[in-house]
């Protein structure tokens, strides 16, 4: 079983039909010909440039193409928010689905030259860095176009120098319209457990690794759970600390005492892997966790096969709504990130930078409708656009009372039984959209959902965050070449130990191999970039 799981995880070549489809011209014209950083394409002339103020909606209803980084979303249905955005901006958007930057199809898309006008992705992760994407002629440098067509975004940068520092390169080049998380939304994930099972078993919500072990054994032996804890691999130690934070480590890169650190090299990671391997051997971790998707995890949590997971804030609401609808009596609550010692504060949990690079909009270097692209993006940073993206459509999802937005019953008492976040997905861009996020103050149906974020925030994670550094194109090329081998190797080695294919002593070989693959050079490059960021 374990070797089959590992085999299913290995990368396969994408069929050449993908390249053919991408090259078919469905994204509009354009090519990847190299362009100097100072050049911009000739766009529609702007009345504002001639001294006349621009006003929405834009005349002529230009149509633009847009793609995101979320492949699992496919091509989204046109919803109320899309219609309202078009009405207000005068600009139509044709959604083309999503391609993650790490997906092989992303390279094929670049090779085809048929990029969308607007591409939401994490351009910090571009091979060679965002300046390389500009140098190669794929996306535009934005300094000039911000001055010409983006007064709202420009004002936001002037008013928030901390944001301005984050969203440009060391040489001062703006490369994307960013998604900036609000302070309240930087934490949104953590451990989730079935409280009704704990009550029935006479157990408290676990706070330590030993308590988690005892709880999972009880779920297996006394509740018949076939997968006491289940989760997707993205929660193993990079997006959240998962259980690794209890050992004072986390996967991926972070800053410790002013030095960029790779968590997999830290001694505590060996102890963490040993614990996970032992739990897996005891049947406490879902035997299929390495290949699970969200739908399968949801089914296991709501069917009684599992009693714990690691997931996002909204999962608690989703699971409790399911329990309410089927009268199962299940009750799902947040659990704190665990520690080794009772009463200790976890070193790591889940915490994003305000700007993590994700869902940030770059502009195709050869777009033929430059002004329309920038005006559409700039609208999100206006007060009116911010209100729409946060609270939706006045009179539909909210009303103004005493100068403040108040959600309507469509959101808080939805007649179809939808959670408030599910409703707002149709009427607003509350997250993962190029904008400065505001606290949406959503009203959840369950108090367990409201309490979750405060429980998960209680960590020291802020002390370790690596800011959005931008290596030079030369450094980024070297990083990309090194990390392509390192990332694949470390993820495979980690799974082999947890699944019991390799003994825990293989961790020592893993560290040696990482050094041979160049991890120390990676840390050196990132340290230099980190120090440049601090000096911006």
Image: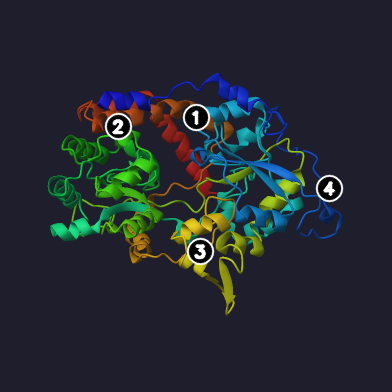
Farthest residue, direction right: 50
Spatial CA distance of label 2 from label 4 is 55 Å
Spatial CA distance of label 3 from label 4 is 36 Å
Q: Report the residue at 75% width, 52% height from top.
A: 149
Spatial CA distance of label 1 from label 2 is 21 Å
Q: Percent x, y for residue 347?
A: 30, 52
139 to 168, vertically: above or below: above
Q: Which residue is mark 1?
A: 480
The label on residue 381 is: none
Q: Percent x, y for residue 333?
A: 29, 59
In the displayed structure image, the side of residue 286 where residue 420 appears, left or right: right
> Observer-nearest residue: 97 or 205?
97
Q: Which residue is mark 4?
A: 45
Specify the quadrant that holds the N terminus: top left
- Quick check: can you spot residue 151? no
Query: Which tag is nearer the camera, tag 3 or tag 4?
Result: 3
> Observer-nearest residue: 506 or 172?
506
Q: Report the residue at 60% width, 52% height from top.
A: 79
Q: Earlier in the sequence, mark 2 or mark 4?
A: 4
Q: Which residue is mark 2?
A: 494
Q: Does dot 4 land on a helix, a strand or a loop? A: loop
Asked whether disc 2 touches disc 3, contact meaning CB atoms under 8 Å apart, the reply is: no
Q: Earlier in the sequence, mark 1 or mark 2?
A: 1
């Amino acid at each position: 079983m374990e070797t089959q799981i590992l085999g299913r995880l290995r990368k396969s070549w994408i069929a050449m039909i993908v390249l053919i489809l991408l090259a078919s011209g469905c994204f509009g014209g354009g090519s990847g010909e190299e362009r100097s950083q100072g050049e911009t394409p000739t766009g529609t002339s702007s009345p504002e440039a001639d001294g006349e103020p621009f006003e929405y909606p834009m005349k002529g209803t230009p149509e633009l193409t847009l793609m995101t980084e979320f492949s699992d979303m496919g091509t989204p249905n046109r919803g109320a928010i899309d219609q309202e955005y078009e009405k207000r901006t005068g600009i139509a958007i044709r959604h083309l689905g999503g391609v993650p930057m790490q997906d092989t199809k992303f390279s094929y898309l670049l090779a085809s030259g048929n990029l969308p006008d607007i591409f939401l992705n994490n351009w910090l992760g571009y091979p060679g860095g965002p300046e390389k994407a500009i140098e190669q002629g794929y996306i535009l440098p934005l300094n000039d176009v911000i001055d010409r067509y983006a007064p709202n975004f420009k004002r936001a940068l002037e008013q928030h120098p901390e944001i301005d520092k984050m969203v440009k390169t060391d040489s001062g080049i703006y490369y994307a319209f960013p998604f900036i998380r609000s302070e309240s939304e930087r934490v949104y994930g953590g451990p989730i457990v079935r409280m009704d099972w704990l009550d029935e078993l006479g157990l408290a919500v676990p706070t330590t690794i030993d308590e988690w072990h005892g709880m999972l054994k009880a779920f297996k032996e006394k509740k018949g759970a076939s997968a006491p804890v289940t989760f997707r691999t993205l929660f193993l130690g990079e997006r959240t600390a998962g259980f690794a934070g209890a050992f004072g480590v986390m996967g991926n890169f972070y800053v410790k005492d002013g030095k960029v650190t790779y968590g997999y090299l830290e001694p505590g990671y060996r102890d963490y892997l040993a614990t996970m391997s032992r739990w897996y051997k005891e049947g406490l971790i879902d035997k299929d966790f390495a290949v699970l998707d969200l739908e399968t995890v949801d089914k296991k949590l709501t069917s009684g096969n599992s009693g714990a997971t690691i997931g996002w804030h909204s999962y608690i609401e989703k699971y409790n709504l399911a329990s309410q609808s089927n009268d199962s009596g299940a009750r799902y609550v947040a659990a704190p990130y665990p520690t080794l010692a009772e009463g200790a504060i976890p070193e790591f949990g889940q915490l994003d930078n305000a700007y993590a690079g994700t869902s940030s909009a770059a502009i195709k270097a050869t777009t033929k409708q430059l002004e329309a692209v920038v005006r559409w993006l700039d609208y999100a940073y206006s007060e009116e656009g911010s209100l729409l993206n946060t609270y939706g459509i006045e009179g539909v999802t909210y009303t103004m009372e005493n100068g403040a937005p108040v959600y309507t019953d469509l959101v808080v008492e939805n007649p179809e039984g939808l959670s408030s976040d599910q409703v707002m997905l149709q009427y607003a861009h509350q997250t993962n959209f190029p904008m400065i996020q505001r606290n949406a103050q959503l009203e959840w149906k369950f108090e367990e959902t409201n309490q979750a974020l405060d429980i998960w925030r209680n960590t020291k994670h802020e002390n370790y965050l690596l800011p959005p550094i931008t290596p030079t194109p030369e450094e980024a090329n070297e990083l990309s070449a090194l990390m392509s081998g390192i990332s694949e190797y470390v993820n495979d080695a980690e799974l082999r130990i947890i699944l019991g294919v390799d003994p825990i002593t293989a961790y020592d070989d893993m560290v040696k191999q990482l050094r041979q693959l160049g991890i120390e050079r990676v840390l050196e490059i990132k340290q230099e970039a980190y120090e440049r960021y601090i000096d911006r």
